[in-house]
Image (spheres, helix red, strand yellow):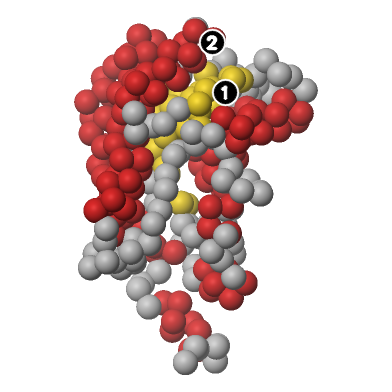
Amino acid sequence: MAEAGGKPRLAGKVALVTGAGSSGPGVGTGKAIAITLAREGAKLMLMDRDPGRAGETLAAIAEELGSRDIGAVCAGDVSLLADCRTVVDTAIARFGKLDILVNNVGISRNTDVLGLKEEDWDAILDVNLKGMALMASAAIPHLLKSGHGAMVHISSVAAHRPSGTTVAYAAAKGGVEAMSRSIAVTHGEAGIRSNCVAPGNIYTPMVAANMDERKRRDRRMGNPMRTEGTAWDIAQAVAFLASDEARWITGQTLIVDGGYTAAPIGWFTAQQRKAGDAQP
């Protein structure tokens, strides 16, 4: 969406997007976010542990917008502070400033607390929580220098309605939202905004590999809108929070889930029974 007069709402902004490549065929959240921010006029630094995936995102942007001077790729692991600092420094060297950080990287391994392995807990918390904190730590000094900045961290509805098999993932995402609020309070006076977007059960390459058609249908029917969310829905929410349209919004979480968390627990099962479609 362009501002009045046709100017893209992120024109002149520089954004760093982590996890900017898709993990398989299709469009994941990082790729959709990067493309959407570029459409809104932002210059991009795309970070991914696999630079080839981020390169595919950049190539798609260049093909659509007809320009290869819109962004750059930097390989890195968000769980390593040195890598986080390197990608931020690379963005500053290339574009001269940093206005937006989108903390998008995330991994998931399903297990309940009784079957939890220490290495799974460590891996999920290292990437999903520590990684976002380290990226914020690396980015904030440059946002402070500019006197403004927007940070958008990708959380999850698991922070609000977790299942028993997502204990580490839910803990990490709950921590992300608490971290975001803390940043908003600590650095708000300096003009830095910090918010979260919490996706619902969207369909992306990360979940497609473990999704049959029945499970995909149940996820789609498990929200009051009875429609399937995509990475593009998340990208639009991120673009809004990153833009000056959200200039007075900070310390908040925007839940994008088709109403999933608004419905009472057990709502979907009741709807199935009402429709005569309950499973044995």
Residue displayed at 49% across by 33% down: 49
Tell me residue 54's x, y (percent): 59, 32
Please, what secondary structure does the residue beneath circle 2 have? Answer: helix
Q: Nearer the viewer, residue 239 or 244?
A: 239
> What crowding class fits label 1: few (fewer than 14 Cα within 10 Å), some (14-19), or many (20 or more)?
many
Measured in 3D between alpha carbons, the distance from the residue under mark 2 to the one under mark 1, in whole angstroms, is 13 Å
The residue carrying mark 2 is 95
Residue displayed at 54% across by 92% down: 276
Q: Nearer the viewer, residue 169 or 80?
A: 80
Q: Looking at the image, how many numbered discs can be counted on the residues?
A: 2
> On the rendered structure, is 178 left or right of 227?
left
Tell me residue 107's x, y (percent): 42, 48
Could you say which quadrant of the image residue 142 lies in? Answer: top left
Tell me residue 125's x, y (percent): 29, 45
> On the rendered structure, is 232 left or right of 66?
left
Q: Work out whether mark 2 precedes mark 1 in sequence or the reverse, and give the earlier one.
A: 1
The residue carrying mark 1 is 73
Residue 34 shows up from this direction:
no
Name the residue type under label 2.
Answer: Phe
> On the rendered structure, is 200 left or right of 62?
left
Q: Nearer the viewer, residue 88 or 160?
A: 88
